Image: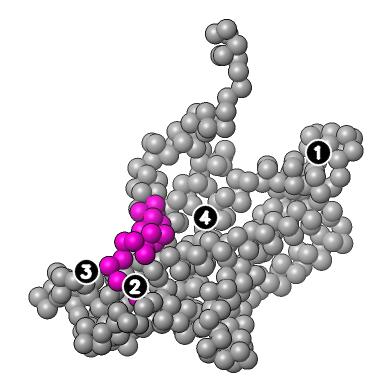
Amino acid sequence: MNNLAMNAPLSRWQRFLKSNLLHDFRRNPVAIVSMAIFMLIVLMAVFSPFVAPFDPYDPTQLDIMNSEIPPRWQVEGDPAFLFGTDAQGRDLWSAILYGTRVSLLIGIGAVALQALLGISIGLVAGYVGGRTDNLLMRVADVQLSFSTLMVAIIFLAVSQAIFGSETFNQYALFMLVIVIGVAEWPQYARTVRATVLAEKKKEYVDAARVLGFGPMRIMLRHILPNSISPIFVISTMQVANAIISEASLSFLGLGMPVSQPSLGSLISSGFDYIFSGSWWITAIPGVILVVLVLVINLLGDWLRDVLNPKLYKG
């Protein structure tokens, strides 16, 4: 009985507990601290309606008499406002919590769209090959010749002019997800294509063909799982890039409106007041944005090292 228990196959959770990934994570203090900070930011953003003392979306809670109050630790600060208030009298701490949630939604949504497009195109290009591969990769090369911000600025400016500011602001989140996602898919496509070109020559793919499996099943059930490691690494980096892109577009006035704050729109809304002494309106959201992007990039670097056999040291 004991021998049967010892020879029983390990569950996924047991394999994860014994994996190099978790082993290296426990020995890497930078990864542990980065993950702790990231999870703290994510949890506070997700539960912002319960954590935030005010609702920044509710105009009835705004009082213009409370505008530009300094943070609590300053002499003129108000204990009711931890990070002070902005020019509209909105509690900055509450706006940052809600704004971080919006920035994370855009970052994750854009990366999901990038992955869907890029992985699909990369699988088809690498597996089919020939003219299909050449055509799809030339399209990717053309896409890469344009910067994300340039494509996004043109698309969002035209959309704002066509639909009007009111309609644009109503659907700004979805437009940002679409434009950032469409602009960055070649990163996935090129990586997945390279993996597919290497994997499709291996024996397990030949065996799947002999068994009569179709191309779709071979690509999705056999080749794609062997491309997961680089996809995870790219996704981590791309979430940080998408958040930065959203912040840049919001700062330029082409992102989230002031009434639906993201970290970028909060930084933009306070930029005009930074030289008048109200530095906290821009500086504090800016620090939160830098910390968020930094910990994501650090986690991406750690994930890249531990998933790369040539770099992994054990």
> Residue 184's image quarter?
bottom right
Q: Furthest residue to the front?
A: 60
Q: Please give the name of the residue rendered at 57% of the width and 32% of the height, measured from the top-left corner.
A: 12
Q: Which residue is mark 1?
A: 205
The answer to which of marks 2 and 3 sits earlier in the sequence is 2
Q: Furthest residue to the left?
A: 75
- Magenta-tinted stretch: 38-56
Q: Residue 307's spot in the image, x, y percent?
A: 55, 42
Out of 217 and 45, give the one closest to the viewer: 45
Viewer-side label of 3, 1: 3
Tell me the SS state at disc 2.
Answer: loop
Q: Which residue is mark 4?
A: 236
Q: Which mark is residue 55?
A: 2
Viewer-side label of 2, 4: 2
Is residue 48 one of those drawn in magenta? yes
Tell me the SS state at disc 4.
Answer: helix
Q: Residue 290's spot in the image, x, y percent?
A: 37, 65
Q: Residue 286's spot in the image, x, y percent?
A: 34, 71
Magenta region's main secondary structure? helix
User: Residue 213, relative to residue 181: is it above or below?
Assistant: above
- Measured in 3D between alpha carbons, the distance from the residue under mark 2 to the one under mark 4, in whole angstroms, is 30 Å
In the figure, is residue 293 to the left or right of 184?
left
Q: Which residue is mark 3?
A: 82
Q: Amino acid at mark 1?
A: Val
